[in-house]
């Protein structure tokens, strides 16, 4: 007769570092991106480095004091507040599930409404930016092509950096964002203009013959992948010469705004940007006062509601 099995009590990690590593293994099994893993590690580490006494299963008040002080920091921006809230709250919920803490001190906290950074780049500034790279060099040609590609497709920088030559169909003017590289984990096909196809073809033509399909299309001259930091440095160097400030994501914002100004459909824009619904798409589009004025003149219902009048004579 088999002996009666007793319930084994799981050991609670003695340090937050050990708890964080277990949490990250769990998130990795869910298939989250490498960047999201880094973000979780950064946010949790930053909190506990500032409040080391907060990780004490026997002292819940220390954790409460820590998170209240952390989120109540003077001058904290809504976006920073929301990031801290989301990453820490998710970690704390996992800790509850594992019996490490009893309650999530952030349970009833709500996100703050962020106005968002309004991006409305002057078209002349964009034109000047496109002229900055020295296209007689590989790096300059790559930068020029990337700028045009961002402005023609609205693709996310990280998604663009992962594109391979086999993802492009130059004749059909299409490129596939693969499921494993898409932020939303859903593949999508983007379309681009013949002008963009031309510069992409020029870039592909100068690739060394020894580079196979594993080398990204938009890479360094050594064949190494680009990342948001190296690309950000490139944009910054051009902007210093122009005397302006532009960050890589501004090109995505500009694509969205200019697409709508040219009469593009909002639902089509949502699909191109890779958003699951229009809620996120709206955050990327900042219509200027002049845009609103033009739209009102075009679509105001008063023209249909009031009968047209004959030209009035001079009033005595």
Image (cartoon, rainbow, N blue to C red):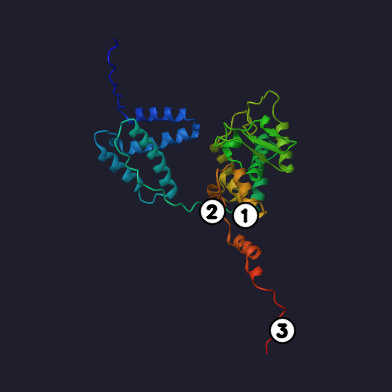
**Residue at image point 33% right, 34% down:** 96
SS of the residue under disc 2: loop
**Residue at image point 27% right, 19% down:** 6
Q: Which mark is residue 118?
A: 2
SS of the residue under disc 3: loop
**Tags 2 and 3 in contact by the CB under 8 Å rule?**
no
**Lower position in the chain sequence, tag 1 or tag 3:** 1
Q: Residues within 10 Å of mark 2 (few under 14, many from 20)?
A: some
Could you say which quadrant of the image residue 12 lies in? top left
Q: Is residue 220 left or right of residue 96?
A: right
**Lower position in the chain sequence, tag 2 or tag 3:** 2
**Tags 1 and 3 in contact by the CB under 8 Å rule?**
no
Q: Position of residue 258 (x, y in %)?
A: 64, 52
Q: Position of residue 272 (x, y in %)?
A: 62, 43
Q: Residues within 10 Å of mark 1 (few under 14, many from 20)?
A: few
Q: Is residue 16 left or right of residue 251?
A: left
Q: Residues within 10 Å of mark 3 (few under 14, many from 20)?
A: few
Give the quadrant of the N terminus. top left
* Residue at the disc numbered 1: 122
Q: Which mark is residue 204?
A: none
Q: Position of residue 244 (x, y in %)?
A: 57, 51
* Residue at the disc numbered 3: 313
Q: Position of residue 173 (x, y in %)?
A: 72, 39
**Tags 1 and 2 in contact by the CB under 8 Å rule?**
no
Q: Nearer the viewer, residue 49 or 20?
A: 20
Q: Nearer the viewer, residue 93 or 124?
A: 93
Q: Is residue 273 left or right of residue 117?
A: right
The CA distance from mark 2 to mark 3 is 47 Å
């Amino acid at each position: 007769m088999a002996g009666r099995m007793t319930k084994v009590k799981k050991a609670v990690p003695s340090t937050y570092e050990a708890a964080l590593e277990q949490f990250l293994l769990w998130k990795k099994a869910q298939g989250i991106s490498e960047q999201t893993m880094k973000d979780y590690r950064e946010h949790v580490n930053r909190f506990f480095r500032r409040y080391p006494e907060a990780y004490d299963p026997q002292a819940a008040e220390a954790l409460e004091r820590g998170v209240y002080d952390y989120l109540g920091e003077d001058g904290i921006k809504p976006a920073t507040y929301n990031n801290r809230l989301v990453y820490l709250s998710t970690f704390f919920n996992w800790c509850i599930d594992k019996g490490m803490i009893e309650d999530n001190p952030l349970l009833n906290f709500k996100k703050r409404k962020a106005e968002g950074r309004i991006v409305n780049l002057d078209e002349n500034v964009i034109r000047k930016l496109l002229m900055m790279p020295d296209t007689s060099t590989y790096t300059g040609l790559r930068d020029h092509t990337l700028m045009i590609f961002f402005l023609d497709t609205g693709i996310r920088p990280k998604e663009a950096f992962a594109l391979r030559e086999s993802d492009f169909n130059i004749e059909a003017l299409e490129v596939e964002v693969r499921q494993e590289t898409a932020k939303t984990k859903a593949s999508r096909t983007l379309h681009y203009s013949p002008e963009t196809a031309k510069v992409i073809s020029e870039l592909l033509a100068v690739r060394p013959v020894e580079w196979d399909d594993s080398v990204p299309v938009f890479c360094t001259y050594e064949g190494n992948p680009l990342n948001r930091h190296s690309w950000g440095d490139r944009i910054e160097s051009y902007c210093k010469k122009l005397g302006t400030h532009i960050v890589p994501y501004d090109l995505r914002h500009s694509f969205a705004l200019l697409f709508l100004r040219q009469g593009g459909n909002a639902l089509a824009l949502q699909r191109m940007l890779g958003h699951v619904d229009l809620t996120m798409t709206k955050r990327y589009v900042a219509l200027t006062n002049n845009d609103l004025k033009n739209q009102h003149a075009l679509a105001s219902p008063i023209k249909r509601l009031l009968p047209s009048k004959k030209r009035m004579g001079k009033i005595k």
